[in-house]
Image (cartoon, helix red, strand yellow):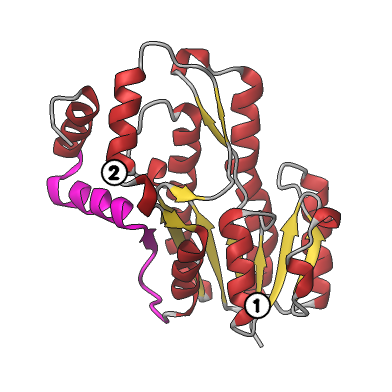
Amino acid sequence: MSTIFITGSSSGIGKASAKLFAKKGWTVTATMRRPEKETELTEYENIKLYPLDVANPEQVAETVSAVLAQYDVDVLFNNAGYGMKARFEDMTEEFMWKSINTNVLGMVRVTQKFIPYFKQKRAGMILTTTSLAGEMGLVLDGVYAADKWAVTGMCEMLYSELAPFGIQVKTLVPGVVKTNFVMEQIPSEGYEDMIRNQVNLLMPDPDDMEEAGEVAQDAYAAVTDGDKDRMCYVTGTQAKELYAKRQELGDEMFRRYLRDTLLGVNKI
């Protein structure tokens, strides 16, 4: 039986993935900040709950050590995250640090603990949830965009750095997903039209948004498809279309396309 370690399992993509992998017969070590409050995942015999706040270095070390002492982990799924939307000039020190500490340093802390273990096994996979915001500069994403671009860059680096040890590195790239993931928001006066255009671009049909369970299916496919060369798995119809358009147009032309669309020059 294969085993996966998932961060951020209390809701959304993490919880949906924990359920799906468990139903597929995997042992799931599902981590979250307050496992004592979890009620759904406790119904699965093959889901084991552990406390983990990725912003807490000591707890990261303790939890990963406890899991690896008991289970032979095959996949690390970095999924914990924090979101913030604000005008660039309005970002506060508190919000910026919380974002970087969770999205970037949290991913680094957990991944660092698994790399020596996977190297010793000469096998393993690191799957990390990034974001469409890590592939293109969307307005008001501020330091969140920096976080996701940083994580994407580190994963691309690790894709090569860990290859000699038989360790696969992959990214899961969602767009807008229907979950209870909450983005901290600071009112952004003067950007109402751009926000409306961006919302229309990212989710033209709000009633047809991607569900967390659909993203979990793509996460499972990324882990099990046997493709050792592929790194990036974009999930969601609209995200896939925008990602493909960037590939088609090239970086410079796509930036102009995105800017003009958000300014209302291009009609959505």
Q: Residue furthest front?
A: 207
Q: Decide: is 84 above or below 56.
A: above
> Is 252 contained in the magenta span?
no
Residue type marked 1: Ala
Residue type marked 2: Pro
Q: Secondary structure at mark 2?
A: loop
Residue at 42% across / 25% down in the picture? Answer: 140
Rendering coords of residue 204 (x, y %): 28, 43
The residue that label 2 is drawn on is: 204
Rendering coords of residue 115 (x, y %): 63, 64
Rendering coords of residue 39 (x, y %): 79, 62
Q: Secondary structure at mark 1?
A: helix
Residue 230 in view in this figure: yes
Residue at 72% across / 42% down in the picture? Answer: 55
Q: Decide: is 226 above or below 258.
A: below
Rendering coords of residue 253 (x, y %): 14, 37
Tag 2: Cα neighbours inside 10 Å, few (<14), some, or many (≥20)? Answer: some
**Disc 1 and disc 2: Cα gap in Å?**
33 Å
Residue at 77% across / 62% down in the picture? Answer: 64
Please tell me which residue lies in front, 72 or 267: 267
The residue that label 1 is drawn on is: 22
> Is 247 contained in the magenta span?
yes
Q: Which residues are magenta?
A: 226-251
